Image (spheres, rainbow, N blue to C red):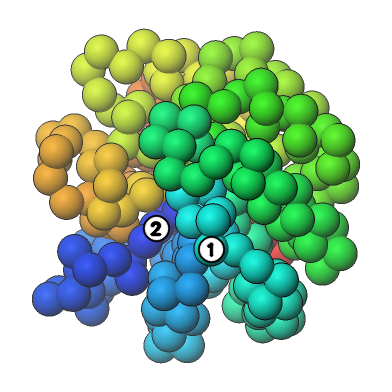
Amino acid sequence: MLFDTHAHLNDEKFVEDRDEVIRRAQEEWGVSLILNVGFNRETILATMDLVEKYDFIYASVGWHPHDAGSFTGEELKWLRSLAKHPKVVALGEMGLDYYWDNAPREVQKEVFRQQIRLAREVQLPIVIHDRDAHEDVLHILREENAKEVGGVMHCFSGDLAFMEACLELNFYIGLGGPVTFKNAKLPKEIAKNVPDNRLLIETDCPYLAPHPYRGKRNETGYVHLVAKQIAKLRGISYEQLAERTMENGKRLFGIK
């Protein structure tokens, strides 16, 4: 059984066949747990609808760095109230994005800090979005004592040294579609070297579809392709990889 630890099933790309995509993931590929991630008001509301409808879908709620400019005290208060919901098991995705720079960097940093403080207050792990901002992400995680709650470095894109720094801060490493790309040397190196107890698999669907679907709409069921590739890289069976990543996901997000 597989745990897709990062999905966006609320996305408009699933508007015509969302239920079918979820059914297919469960029945054809053995996806038995999904963490759906809401990252602004619209996607959080849609995520909460999903977790009410499906017993095997859980929620992470937070404010994406792209949307940092719209984050106010009201949003912080709302996230605090949502954190009490039994199926909200993490906060995020939150972090920094210096590739698109959709919000001023200082604003991104402040919103990131506020959410880490909230996570420590409500004692939930955090889901990190980090694009071209490794150094500042680490700096803020350390200053805000994020190690206290830990979390996952979603769609990990760093090198081995960055991975070690993240592990020291009590974070898991989330790997998805890029690990299946032919010339993706760094993700493959990371996949071989992540400790057994810190590895998570994800899709980030509808984005970052694995080979042979690269460039097309990703589905939560395609996490089985990620699992197969990582198992091959690590020299273990698909079943072993599925079992270990399921255990890791349940442990991090406190799912019984």
Left or right: where 11 falls relative to 120: left
* Marks 1/2: CA–CA distance: 23 Å
x 50%, y 25%: residue: 132
Above-or-below relation of 203 to 256: above
- When asked about the image quadrant of residue 89, the answer is bottom right
Residue 252 visible in the current orientation: no
x 61%, y 45%: residue: 108
Above-or-below relation of 52 to 245: below
Left or right: where 143 falls relative to 208: right
**Residue 70's disc number:** 1
x 35%, y 27%: residue: 179
Q: Secondary structure at mark 1?
A: helix
- When asked about the image quadrant of residue 254, the answer is bottom right
Q: Residue 207: x percent and y percent?
A: 28, 47
- Of residues 106 and 87, the one drawn nearer to the viewer in this rendering: 106
Q: Residue 224: x percent and y percent?
A: 31, 46
Q: Secondary structure at mark 2?
A: strand
Total numbered circles = 2
- Of residues 247 and 103, the one drawn nearer to the viewer in this rendering: 103
Specify few, some or many for label 2: CA neighbours under 10 Å numbering under 14, 14-19, or 20 or more.
many
Looking at the rendered image, the quarter that the N terminus falls into is bottom left
What's under tag 1, amino acid-wise?
Ser
Q: Residue 24: x percent and y percent?
A: 21, 67
What's under tag 2, amino acid-wise?
Ala
